[in-house]
Amino acid sequence: MTGRQVTGFLWLGWIVLCILVMVCVASDMATVKKVKEDQTLKEQKVVRDLQQQIHQLQVQQQQIQKNGN
């Protein structure tokens, strides 16, 4: 094997390694994005639930005040 072939194989190895690293990083970034989206959806559901509870309490408070007067 000549020096030129060795150099070619080394360059090919570096290129393959770089591609693998880029694929892994992209995969991790996609996973992080998905986790953030899931967390946002959970937070939105919690907010909706709390808003619904607040509304129910306000209705109950109005009924109590109405019955008290």
Image (spheres, rainbow, N blue to C red):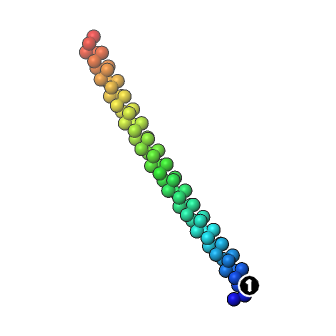
User: At 32% from the left edge and 19% from the top edge, which residue is drawn?
Assistant: 62
In the figure, is residue 4 to the left or right of 51? Answer: right
Q: Residue 53: where, in percent of width, then height?
A: 34, 31
* Count of marks, rendered view: 1
Q: Quadrant of the N terminus?
A: bottom right
Residue at the spot of label 1: 3
Q: Nearer the viewer, residue 65 or 20?
A: 20
Q: Residue furthest left?
A: 67
Q: Quadrant of the C terminus?
A: top left
Q: Residue 3: where, in percent of width, then height?
A: 74, 84
User: At 52% from the left edge and 52% from the top edge, which residue is drawn?
Assistant: 33
Q: For label 1, count other residues whose C-alpha is less than 10 Å away and answer few (under 14), some (14-19) or many (20+).
A: few
| Quarter-of-image position of residue 4 | bottom right
| Quarter-of-image position of residue 47 | top left
In the rendered image of this protein, does residue 47 appear above or below residue 2? Answer: above
In the rendered image of this protein, does residue 55 appear above or below residue 21? Answer: above
Q: Residue furthest right?
A: 4
